[in-house]
Amino acid sequence: MEDGISRRELVRLLGTSAAALWLPPSARAWAKPAPLPATAPARDEAYWASVREQFVMPSDLAVMNAANLCPSSGPVLETLSKATREMDREPSPACRARMHDGKEVTRRALAEFLRVTPEEIVITRNTSESNNLVSSGLDLEKGDDVLLFSDNHPSNHVAWKEKGRRHGFTVNVVPAVSPHPGADYYLEAFTRALTPRTKVLAFTHLTSTVGDLLPARDLCRLARDRGILTLVDGAQSFGLMDVDLRDMDPDFYSGSGHKWPCGPKEAGVLFINRRSATRIWPSIYSAYPGAVGISKSFESFGQRDEPAILALSEALQLQTRVGRKAIEDRGRELAQALMAGLRTLPGVKVWTHPDPVRSVAVVSVQPGGLDPTKLTLALYEKDRIVCATRAGADRGGVRLSPHFYNSHAEVERAVGALKRYLTTGL
Ligand SMILES: Cc1ncc(COP(=O)(O)O)c(C=O)c1O
């Protein structure tokens, strides 16, 4: 997705000139950022600061909550608002047709981003919907087994369990071990838990609990060799990691645009491997299907928020310009610095494994005796740091997930703030 192609396509789709695509400064609630350099300079702090400038959150706010919800960049917000205004200003058949075409632009962008074909892409609302379209769409019955990972999100865990109750199939679970015991451990644990009746293996690429990275490629191969379908929940890897689905080769992969890709809300993805297209039924039958491949039968979801879908391609374009590997490397670098700082604090337990083969950029920590909910609030209100509370007894605490718009200075600020609260209390 070369820089400029998407812009030209958007201009064509919105039936307007490139100049008009951008709102006049007076109509914008934020300053238009200077464009990122077209070629990659040294990836130093100054470069990452220019990435940060693409975003509209106040400059004093350190947002380390990508595992939950990422802010959209200025260009994404402008595409979203521009397309929404076009749609409502000129509700003509021609405009409707252009908006439908816009979905195909995004489908191609998603396919390129995940290194698969547009024929294998379904544009959904989010990972929850994608996961549920899989668990609802497969022919499973009494006598069949589904194998899960205990740290799956409810949309990939509760969903299977409830559908098992309804349709009579059995759900087995491989428990997460903390700290992450390594890829070999999990390969062996999943191998042992498979039965001759296992039909589906559904696990999470990078967990949202403590940021454990699972050996997705090897697990998919393990299942494929036995004729077992795989659902890989990619909510925490899509837009953070340099994901290559052709190489990983799952049957199904799910993701949300509003997390690491920094896209709009309610635009997500379900990859359906071409070899698996005949194994899954659509769950929704309505109007306005996609134009190619599986989307022709699987994506008749009725009227969509097409401006949001269009804006997702803008988000992917920004990521591509920065570089997918560069984004993954930056996330790892910041998370490594964060974990190194947190490990020096007395009484603090870092749940996330520091080995970069076992984690990426989701970092969970038990903050000594501090109350996690109060800590999250204090960090936001007093220190201008956004993170998430992980409530409960199971590896509870707070979760910080730095992304490509964060800096080392912000990481140091987070460690310093926690150190202060450990001394002074909340
Ligand atoms: C691993 C995982 N799967 C699924 C989801 C659900 O994502 P969404 O709310 O975008 O559907 C999340 C959300 O945090 C997640 O972390």
Image (cartoon, grey):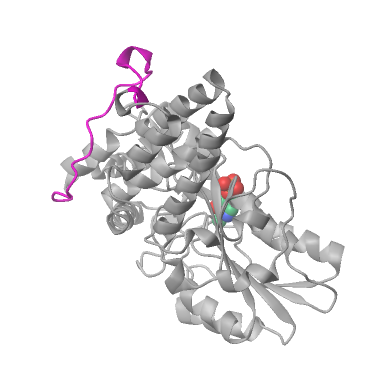
Residue 175 falls inside the magenta stretch: no
User: What's the magenta region?
Assistant: 20-43
**Residue farthest to the left, as pictured:** 42
| Observer-nearest of 284 and 178 | 284
Residue 37 falls inside the magenta stretch: yes
* Residue 342 horizontal/vertical position (percent): 35, 52
Residue visible at 32% across and 51% down in the picture: 320
In the rendered image of this protein, does residue 401 appear above or below residue 183?
Answer: above
Give the image quarter of residue 384. top left
Give the image quarter of residue 335. bottom left
**Residue farthest to the front, as pictured:** 94
| Observer-nearest of 421 and 299 | 299
Left or right: 158, with 93 as reference point: right
**Residue farthest to the top, as pictured:** 26
Left or right: 214, with 157 as reference point: left
Q: Decide whether the magenta segment is chiefly helix, strand or loop.
A: loop
Left or right: 411, with 143 as reference point: left
The answer, for residue 123, to whether it is visible in the render is yes
Residue visible at 42% across and 51% down in the picture: 109
Give the image quarter of residue 336. bottom left
